[in-house]
Image (cartoon, coloured by chain):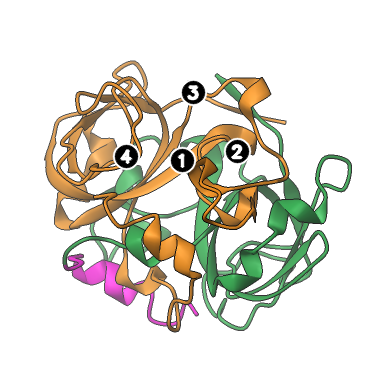
Chain colours: A green, B orange
């Protein structure tokens, strides 16, 4: 087992987890002022995007899926394993989103298009480097395109 | 604090963490057979790539950086905050890599280009969906391009 302490929290943005329309959400992440100084974010403003790793902390233990389910409960889509979808009811309850960096001020990072709600514990922030993008063309099933139609 | 239990481990591939030449590494991830069945991976083979979230478990507490440092210790590059680089000596020691899915067999996922060593604990596997790619052009500083030159 690994103990993870949040490095900060999402502040602002949306108050409730909804399925769609995350694109205009403009929350910030405030680093924990007891452990970090602005040095921890030095240079982040020279990147356009960051990957945010966070915890879906509203998900309770009994909601976690370890097998397969229909994405969003939609039976028009096939039953898909929890590790072949990005739903929040997953082991370790880890969320991951690439968001645009709007500004970095002191211990705060302002972001656009982060699909995490106000108060969400953040485990890590990583800059998006073009060299870490998928190598080769991306292939995905039809349901994965349909599910993203109104997401941003 | 959040307790995270590995969902599986990296098996095979490289035995030691080195800076470059990860592209041909072909490890697999074996899910924990005590907790999962192949259902957890159902449909993963319909995606080309997966994002793997893992723990840099060889990093000791005293090696963790909370401020800024030169990436790879290279003083040709600027001092950069730990959350503006992807080095392993970071709070929560979380690694994140996009790898190509070669095959899915039972509880195993064979991957190409995963920058995690044999034995690494895995916290999550997520399919890469084109809708989750960065929205807008990627901007990054020059050092971030140079550091990736021989990485894959």
Q: Which residue is drawn at 51% across and 61% down?
A: A97
Q: Mark 3: give few (<14), some (14-19) or many (20+) Cα within 10 Å.
A: some
Quick check: marks 2 and 4 in contact, CB under 8 Å? no
Do the residues marked 2 and 4 share a common chain? yes
* Whether residue A61 is visible: no
Quick check: marks 1 and 2 in contact, CB under 8 Å? no
Instruction: Using the image, name the chain to which the residue with label 2 belongs.
Output: B
Q: How far apart are marks 3 and 1 (CA)?
A: 10 Å
Q: Up-down: is A150 above or below A15? A: below
Identify the residue position indicated by label 4 in the image.
B115
Q: Distance between the residues labelled 1 and 2?
A: 9 Å
Badge 2 marks a residue whose secondary structure is: loop
* Whether residue A22 is visible: yes
Quick check: marks 1 and 4 in contact, CB under 8 Å? yes
Q: Which residue is drawn at 41% across and 55% down?
A: A86
Quadrant where the N terminus of chain B is found in the figure: top right
Instruction: Using the image, name the chain to which the residue with label 1 belongs.
Output: B
Q: How far apart are marks 2 and 4 (CA)?
A: 16 Å
Q: Residue B95 carries which label?
A: 1
Identify the residue position indicated by label 3 in the image.
B57
Q: Which of B44 and B65 is in front in this view?
A: B65
Whether the magenta-drawn stretch holds residue A98 is answered as no
Question: Which badge, 1 or 4, is on the more N-terminal residue?
Answer: 1
Whether the magenta-drawn stretch holds residue A142 is answered as yes
Residue B23: x percent and y percent?
Answer: 20, 46
Question: Which badge, 4 or 3, is on the more N-terminal residue?
Answer: 3
Q: Up-down: is A19 above or below A66? A: below
Question: Which badge, 3 or 1, is on the more N-terminal residue?
Answer: 3
Q: Distance between the residues labelled 1 and 4?
A: 9 Å
């Amino acid at each position: 087992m690994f103990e993870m302490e949040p490095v900060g929290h999402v502040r602002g943005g949306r108050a409730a987890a909804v399925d769609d329309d995350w694109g205009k959400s403009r929350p910030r992440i405030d680093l924990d002022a007891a452990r970090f100084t602005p040095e921890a974010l030095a240079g982040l403003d020279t990147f356009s995007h960051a990957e945010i790793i966070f915890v879906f902390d509203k998900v309770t233990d009994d909601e976690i899926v370890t097998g397969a389910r229909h994405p969003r409960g939609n039976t028009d889509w096939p039953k898909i394993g929890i590790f072949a979808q990005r739903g929040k009811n997953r082991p370790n309850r880890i969320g991951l989103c690439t968001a645009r960096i709007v500004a970095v001020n002191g211990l705060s990072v302002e972001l656009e298009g982060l699909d995490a709600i106000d108060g969400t514990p953040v485990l890590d922030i990583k800059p998006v480097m073009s060299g870490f993008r998928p190598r080769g063309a991306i292939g995905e099933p039809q349901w994965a395109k349909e599910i993203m139609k109104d997401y941003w």
